Amino acid sequence: MPAFWNTPLIDDLKEHKLDNQSYEIVNQIDADRTHGASQLAVLALEGLQALAELWQGDNVDEFCQDLQVLIDELRSVRPSMVAIANLMDGFQRQFQHIGKARLSDVRESVINIAGQLKEDTRHASEQTAVEVAELINENEVLMTHSLSSMIKRVFTLVRERSVKAIVTESRPGNEGLLLAEFLSSLEIETCYVTDAQIGLWVPQADKIIIGADSILSDGAVVNKSGTSLLALAARESDIPVYVCCERFKWADVNRDQIELEEMDPEELGLPPMEYVVARNIYFDITPAELITAWVSELGVEYEW
């Protein structure tokens, strides 16, 4: 059983009438290593819908209390991904206007509000991909790091432009392998390289395109560790770096306020040895001065 299930938070959830599916979604988000912030944010909204559909009880106040327990847990489960917290806040802003109502009406409101936020999220992601695709020309070589649903959408839109890709393995999860498989299915010529080769391959690219788990208040980017090294190498070679990120991932916090999640060091495969400690921090911060432009569903938001 994953260690997460032994935490006080899950014990608190089990004390309430939360159905198994609701807190299984919390656990799924916590354990996920292959999906980006957009997809996990949508999954969080589905957790709210699951609660409304399956909650066992007949008291509206108890339901709202349990809903708040779930919202608070979802808001904090992946602190490097502000999209989840932002959507939970957006949900609460709309839900607080519901007021006193029958339980059936409150349930329906939760389902409808979360459903509309899911639709808005998907639309923002699709439109952001369209805006990014407009910046990509025929025959360009695009380099990226990690696995981003946004970047997959962009490549899908530009597949007929004879673009090529350079994809890093993105250790320790090797998410780049999944992206390479996806690009192969699109028949896009792809070069798959180790993270250690980033500096060698950046000069071969026309553009760097990356997704983001969060955009901080000063324009800095939180993304899979290795992104800042990619951006540094790009600056050295004068290659533009484009951050492709929907508006719901933008945060009103600075780098001192964001938590960079650290995962199980066993993922690194280091055998036990005296005096050696493995660290596995999954995200890093790329400063704004290394970014050429930030692109959202509104188009090019800022250009350095």
Image: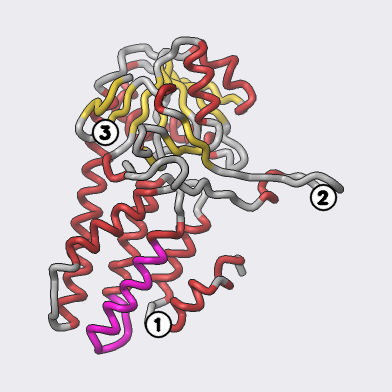
The residue identified by callout 2 is 272
| Residue at 29% from the left image edge and 21% from the top image edge | 303
Name the mark on residue 16.
1
Q: In the structure shown, which secondary structural element does the residue marked by tag 3 occupy?
A: strand
**In the figure, is residue 9 to the left or right of 155?**
right
Q: Residue at x 37, y 66 (%)?
A: 72
Chain-order first, disc 2 or disc 3: 2
Residue indicated by mark 3? 296
Depicted 42 relative to depicted 19: above or below: above
Dot 2 or dot 1: first in sequence order is 1
Pick the quarter of the image with the C terminus: top left
Label 1 sits on a secondary structure element that is loop
249 lies left or right of 116: right
Q: Residues within 10 Å of mark 1 (few under 14, many from 20)?
A: some
Q: Nearer the viewer, residue 80 or 19?
A: 80
| Mark-to-mark CA distance, 2 and 1 | 41 Å
Residue 65, image quadrant: bottom left
Q: Is residue 289 magenta?
A: no
Residue 43 x/y as whole percent? 36, 57
Q: CA distance from mark 2 to mark 3?
A: 44 Å
Which element type, helix, strand or loop, lies under badge 2?
loop
Amino acid type at image mark 2: Pro
The span picked out in magenta is 53-74
Quarter of the picture containing the N terminus is bottom right
Up/down of 29 relative to 164, above or below: below
Looking at the image, is mark 1 or mark 3 earlier in the sequence? Answer: 1
In this figure, which colouring scheme has been used for the structure? secondary structure
Residue 23, percent across and down?
Answer: 43, 70
Q: Amino acid at mark 1?
A: His
